[in-house]
Image (cartoon, helix red, strand yellow):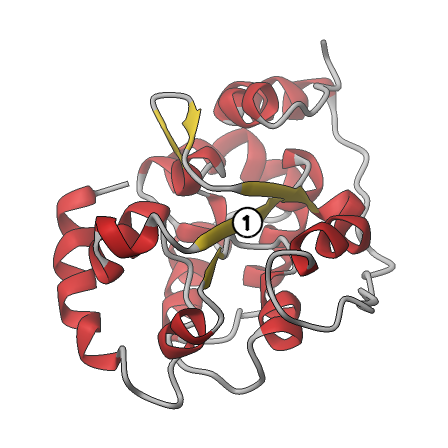
């Protein structure tokens, strides 16, 4: 992901640091930062810890927040994120965009990268690599958000698959009520073909390795 672009965006967003409606002020108040990776229950986690209807809740990298808050300040903040099995995350991201997402950026991604394929199988086989290459945010590998040269930069990495348990760990560092229940979609599985798995395993190879997820074709 483009660090120069992230830097200038962070400089622009410093104007929102003192806004009561911005999540940045909530991060400062709770001395913590959630690096929100797409399709890892981030919105529900934000609502639970920081409050509802906040602005600036987009998907930003650790590098963005280091620029926004400064390196010195972020070193004293508790930083955490959640990751998800690359297979189920991809299926969730595809369905989210297929339905139109929640903003103009998502609609543009749907038009440019989803609608030109008849189904999920065709998208994986012929469209996924291009979507990742062009930094479509919901398909960007998870390691891009919280690592540098393979090193994890944040204090804690929870997993979508053990979300409730991992939130209890975080609640020992961040003040919030940890009684959290995630409502998961019933349609969250897909029978991946061998070709699908080969492509996904290649595109998200670092996610499988760094976050210890098992490949289907391993």
Quadrant of residue 21 within the rendered picture: bottom left
Is residue 65 left or right of 188 when viewed as pictured? left
Residue 98, percent from left and from top: 58, 61
Residue placed farthest to the right in the image? 186
- How many numbered discs sit on the rendered protein? 1
Q: Residue at x 41, y 51 (%)?
A: 137
Residue 17, percent from left and from top: 27, 77
Residue 82, percent from left and from top: 60, 48
In the foreground, 184 or 151: 151
Q: Which residue is mark 1?
A: 81
Q: Residue at x 62, y 69 (%)?
A: 175
Is residue 88 left or right of 154 when viewed as pictured? right
Q: Is residue 26 above or below residue 88?
A: below
User: What element does badge 1 sit on?
Assistant: strand
Q: Residue at x 58, y 18 (%)?
A: 209
Quadrant of residue 170 within the rendered picture: bottom right
Q: Residues within 10 Å of mark 1 (few under 14, many from 20)?
A: many
Which quadrant: the N terminus? top left
In the foreground, 168 or 205: 168
Residue 167, percent from left and from top: 72, 56
Q: Residue at x 28, y 84 (%)?
A: 18
Is residue 120 left or right of 117 when viewed as pictured? right
């Amino acid at each position: 992901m483009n660090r120069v672009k992230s830097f200038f965006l962070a400089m622009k967003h410093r104007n929102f640091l003192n806004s009561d409606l911005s999540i940045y002020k909530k991060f400062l108040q709770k001395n913590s930062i959630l690096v929100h990776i797409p399709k890892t229950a981030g919105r529900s986690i934000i609502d639970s810890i920081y409050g509802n209807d906040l602005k600036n809740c987009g998907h930003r990298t650790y590098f963005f927040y280091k620029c926004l808050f400064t390196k010195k300040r972020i070193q004293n903040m508790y930083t955490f994120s959640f990751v998800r099995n690359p297979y189920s995350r991809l299926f969730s991201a595809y369905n989210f965009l297929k339905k139109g997402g929640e903003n103009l950026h998502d609609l543009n991604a749907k038009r440019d990268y989803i609608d030109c394929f008849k189904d999920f199988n065709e998208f994986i086989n012929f469209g996924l690599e291009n979507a990742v290459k062009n930094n479509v945010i919901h398909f960007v590998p998870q390691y891009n958000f919280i690592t540098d040269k393979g090193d994890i930069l944040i204090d804690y990495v929870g997993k979508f698959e053990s979300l409730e348990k991992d939130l209890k760990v975080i609640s020992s560092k961040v003040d919030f009520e940890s009684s959290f229940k995630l409502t998961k979609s019933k349609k969250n599985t897909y029978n991946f073909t061998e070709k699908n798995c080969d492509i996904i395993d290649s595109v998200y190879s670092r996610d499988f390795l760094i976050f210890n997820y098992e490949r289907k074709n391993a």
